[in-house]
Amino acid sequence: MSDNITAAFERVVPIANLLAEIITYTRPGNYGFRTNHAEQHATWTETAAQFEASGVHSIKTVGYRMRRLSDALEKADNAVDRGRNAMRQTLTVHDALRKLLRAIDRYREWVIRN
Protein backbone atom coordinates (compact mmCIF):
# COMPACT_ATOMS: atom_id res chain seq x y z
CA MET A 1 0.00 0.00 0.00
CA SER A 2 1.35 3.40 -0.90
CA ASP A 3 2.02 6.18 1.55
CA ASN A 4 -0.49 8.36 -0.32
CA ILE A 5 -3.32 5.95 0.46
CA THR A 6 -2.27 5.71 4.10
CA ALA A 7 -2.15 9.50 4.41
CA ALA A 8 -5.55 9.78 2.71
CA PHE A 9 -7.07 7.32 5.18
CA GLU A 10 -5.61 9.33 8.05
CA ARG A 11 -7.17 12.52 6.62
CA VAL A 12 -10.66 11.07 6.44
CA VAL A 13 -10.81 9.39 9.86
CA PRO A 14 -11.83 12.63 11.64
CA ILE A 15 -14.37 13.27 8.88
CA ALA A 16 -15.79 9.78 9.35
CA ASN A 17 -16.20 10.55 13.04
CA LEU A 18 -17.97 13.80 12.12
CA LEU A 19 -20.28 11.89 9.78
CA ALA A 20 -21.07 9.42 12.54
CA GLU A 21 -22.09 12.30 14.79
CA ILE A 22 -24.13 13.95 12.04
CA ILE A 23 -26.02 10.76 11.20
CA THR A 24 -26.56 9.87 14.85
CA TYR A 25 -27.56 13.22 16.31
CA THR A 26 -29.11 15.16 13.42
CA ARG A 27 -32.67 14.79 12.22
CA PRO A 28 -32.95 13.19 8.79
CA GLY A 29 -33.11 15.83 6.10
CA ASN A 30 -31.05 18.28 8.16
CA TYR A 31 -27.66 16.62 7.74
CA GLY A 32 -26.07 19.56 5.88
CA PHE A 33 -22.75 17.80 5.28
CA ARG A 34 -22.04 19.72 2.07
CA THR A 35 -23.22 23.10 3.35
CA ASN A 36 -22.37 23.14 7.06
CA HIS A 37 -19.06 21.29 6.72
CA ALA A 38 -17.86 22.39 3.28
CA GLU A 39 -14.14 21.86 3.94
CA GLN A 40 -14.65 18.36 5.29
CA HIS A 41 -17.01 17.55 2.41
CA ALA A 42 -14.40 18.66 -0.11
CA THR A 43 -11.71 16.54 1.55
CA TRP A 44 -14.08 13.57 1.72
CA THR A 45 -15.01 13.74 -1.97
CA GLU A 46 -11.41 14.34 -3.11
CA THR A 47 -10.25 11.34 -1.09
CA ALA A 48 -13.09 9.21 -2.45
CA ALA A 49 -12.03 10.12 -5.99
CA GLN A 50 -8.41 9.31 -5.15
CA PHE A 51 -9.44 5.91 -3.80
CA GLU A 52 -11.61 5.21 -6.85
CA ALA A 53 -8.62 5.91 -9.11
CA SER A 54 -6.51 3.38 -7.21
CA GLY A 55 -5.43 0.15 -8.85
CA VAL A 56 -6.52 -1.96 -5.87
CA HIS A 57 -10.11 -3.22 -5.98
CA SER A 58 -10.74 -3.01 -2.23
CA ILE A 59 -9.54 0.63 -2.13
CA LYS A 60 -11.68 1.46 -5.19
CA THR A 61 -14.69 -0.01 -3.41
CA VAL A 62 -14.06 2.10 -0.29
CA GLY A 63 -13.89 5.24 -2.47
CA TYR A 64 -17.09 4.32 -4.28
CA ARG A 65 -18.90 3.68 -0.99
CA MET A 66 -17.60 6.97 0.45
CA ARG A 67 -19.05 8.82 -2.53
CA ARG A 68 -22.34 6.96 -2.25
CA LEU A 69 -22.65 7.92 1.43
CA SER A 70 -22.11 11.63 0.77
CA ASP A 71 -24.57 11.45 -2.16
CA ALA A 72 -27.17 9.76 0.06
CA LEU A 73 -26.78 12.46 2.72
CA GLU A 74 -27.34 15.16 0.11
CA LYS A 75 -30.38 13.41 -1.35
CA ALA A 76 -31.84 13.05 2.13
CA ASP A 77 -31.37 16.79 2.65
CA ASN A 78 -33.10 17.50 -0.66
CA ALA A 79 -36.13 15.32 0.12
CA VAL A 80 -38.60 18.15 0.47
CA ASP A 81 -41.58 16.23 1.77
CA ARG A 82 -41.46 14.35 5.03
CA GLY A 83 -43.47 11.42 3.69
CA ARG A 84 -42.37 8.12 2.23
CA ASN A 85 -39.68 9.68 0.05
CA ALA A 86 -37.95 11.24 3.05
CA MET A 87 -38.08 7.95 4.95
CA ARG A 88 -36.73 6.13 1.91
CA GLN A 89 -33.81 8.55 1.70
CA THR A 90 -33.07 8.07 5.39
CA LEU A 91 -32.96 4.33 4.86
CA THR A 92 -30.67 4.90 1.88
CA VAL A 93 -28.25 6.81 4.13
CA HIS A 94 -28.13 3.96 6.62
CA ASP A 95 -27.71 1.40 3.84
CA ALA A 96 -24.85 3.43 2.31
CA LEU A 97 -23.17 3.65 5.72
CA ARG A 98 -23.51 -0.10 6.26
CA LYS A 99 -21.98 -0.82 2.84
CA LEU A 100 -19.11 1.59 3.49
CA LEU A 101 -18.32 -0.17 6.76
CA ARG A 102 -18.38 -3.53 4.99
CA ALA A 103 -16.02 -2.19 2.29
CA ILE A 104 -13.63 -0.94 4.98
CA ASP A 105 -13.67 -4.37 6.62
CA ARG A 106 -12.83 -5.99 3.29
CA TYR A 107 -9.99 -3.51 2.81
CA ARG A 108 -8.63 -4.39 6.26
CA GLU A 109 -8.73 -8.08 5.35
CA TRP A 110 -6.83 -7.29 2.14
CA VAL A 111 -4.17 -5.39 4.09
CA ILE A 112 -3.74 -8.29 6.50
CA ARG A 113 -3.39 -10.78 3.63
CA ASN A 114 -0.82 -8.64 1.83
Image (cartoon, rainbow, N blue to C red):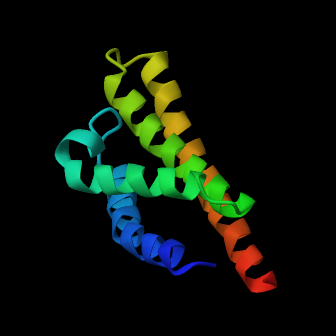
As rendered, which of 57 and 93 lies closer to the eye?
57
The number of discs equals: 0
* Residue 1 in picture, x, y percent from top left: 63, 79
As rendered, which of 104 and 42 lies closer to the eye?
42
* Residue 25 in picture, x, y percent from top left: 31, 53
Residue sitting farthest toward the right:
113
Q: Quadrant of residue 40?
A: bottom left
**Residue displayed at 69% across by 60% down:** 55
Where's the C terminus, which quadrant?
Answer: bottom right
**Residue displayed at 30% across by 40% down:** 27
Eyeballing the image, is 102 above or below 4? above
As rendered, which of 53 and 40 lies closer to the eye?
53
* Residue 52 in picture, x, y percent from top left: 58, 52
Eyeballing the image, is 27 above or below 103? above
**Residue displayed at 20% across by 40% down:** 35
* Residue 100 in picture, x, y percent from top left: 59, 55
Q: Is residue 5 left or right of residue 98?
A: left
Eyeballing the image, is 76 above or below 38? above
